[in-house]
Image (cartoon, rainbow, N blue to C red):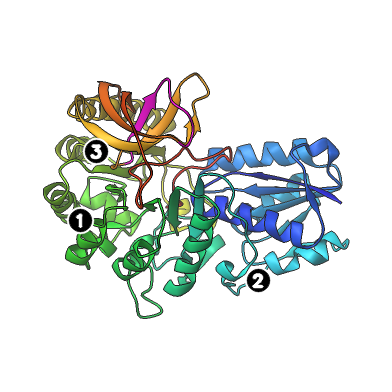
Amino acid sequence: MKAYVESYGCALNHADANILKSLLRKHGAEITDSPEDAGIMFLNTCAVKLPTERRMIDRIKEMDSGNLVVCGCLPAVNLKEIRKISDCTVMDTNSFGRIGDILDGARGDFFSSQHANKLLLPQAYEGPVAVIPCSEGCLGACAYCGTKNARGDLTSYPAKEVKAAVEKAVASGAKEIQLTAQDMGVYGRDIGTTLPELLREVCSVDGSFRVRVGMSNPNAVRKMLAEYLDAFSEENVYKFFHVPVQSGSDAVLRRMRRPYTAAEFKEVVNAIRKRFPDAVIATDVIVGFPGETAEDFGATQQLIRECGFEVVNISKFFPRPRTEAAGMKKTPTHVAKQRSVACAELCAEVSAQRNERFVGREWDVTVLSERENGGFVARAPNYRRAILDEVSIGERVRVRIIKSEANYLVGEAVERLADRRHCQQTPEEGHSHHHDDCR
């Protein structure tokens, strides 16, 4: 049987899609890139935001022809919406063990409350980027988050098994290892270890690769700040920090049930900047959260200016089913939209200013992807994209940055380099539709 897999969402969903394809192959299915040729289709969904959910619902309508299996987060977050339009088979993120049954003709709703260790499931690492799941679930209780309903509480995978997965990926040719989870900052708390200890294990793997650490919530980072920064000092760890603030207003943070203040968040940012002046800091901001006043939004804008984020993922608030925030009085849609536009303009300005300081810098990078609109992409040691011409995929080069834009850098190759243990660069993120992390 031929099987088609289409995947959306975060890096963890991207890892799930890899496992799904590997399991399908194990059970004798052939993976096809054409849904028209498939005897069975799997839609690996995201439901972190309402617009994304609506896109998933539209895609279900388009794909539903009697052989569709909807998996990922949407079945657990909002099965009701799926059932309004389709009687397709659904499978939650804990039910990979039912793939064989589904291929044998089983249909219905497959849900499980038990987290399997996904590192023990078959998975093939193809291409320059390998996404390695380190845990499932989180320790948070954010008022707005529907992903908690899909992924549940924290279950960390043993560090030795994460390391083994990294070894397999590097042996398969991966040049970038993305360690991912709902919250990398709380990795290991349930099994007596920590993220810094995991990073030391991963960085001991022999090979030419770099590591990108996924999102870590600020309250988790504060509890281990010195050890956390020490772990990022490893040569082959990108100096890229994804630490979501969500709001610059303490009043809004309390309603969101985010367990830190804006001042505590800034302590984390300042510590990162002091230790790694060239680091890229990414954050997430929700605008229009219920009860957000103009003053609250102004506090968020001020925090963005003070922290000088290189990357800001901006979301307008949308209620998710079975969350506390769904019962709160909404901010008017036009107000949320205005604030989103204003925030995006400010963030583009700040990011462009931050990028200017890299012009004239030189870094060793590995060229590992081709850009759709011309040129090739590498990433600086701080994970900033560097766009190059007249190079080849897989080539290691010394690059000089000659121009900066708001979201990327433009470079020129000044020297061809021999490979070495830890390359200073790595690739684009493949063709799956995924943002950085659920949050």
Question: Which segment is the magenta one?
Answer: 383-394
Q: Is residue 72 visible?
A: yes
Q: Residues within 10 Å of mark 3 (few under 14, many from 20)?
A: many
Q: Residues within 10 Å of mark 2 (few under 14, many from 20)?
A: few
Instruction: Tell us which disc is closer to us: 2 or 3.
Output: 3
Q: Amino acid at mark 3?
A: Phe
Instruction: Tell us which disc is closer to us: 1 or 2.
Output: 2
The residue sitting at 18% across, 49% down in the picture is 269
How far across and down, in percent of the image, does residue 234 sit? 26, 57
Q: Is residue 146 visible?
A: no
Residue 156 is one of the magenta-drawn residues? no
The residue sitting at 81% across, 51% down in the picture is 87
Q: Amino acid at mark 1?
A: Thr
According to the picture, the residue beneath numbered tag 3 turns out to be 309
How far across and down, in percent of the image, does residue 283 sit? 31, 44
The residue sitting at 58% across, 41% down in the picture is 432
123 displayed left or right of 106: left
- Give the answer, above or below, for where 286 lies relative to 198: above
Q: Residues within 10 Å of mark 1 (few under 14, many from 20)?
A: many
Mark 3 and mark 1 in contact? Answer it, CB < 8 Å.
no
Residue 112 is tagged as 2
For residue 306, which quarter of the picture? top left
Mark 1 and mark 2 in contact? Answer it, CB < 8 Å.
no
Secondary-structure class at tag 3: loop
Sooner in the amino-acid sequence: mark 3 or mark 1: 1
Judging depth in this view, the residue of 39 and 423 nearest the camera is: 423
According to the picture, the residue beneath numbered tag 1 turns out to be 261
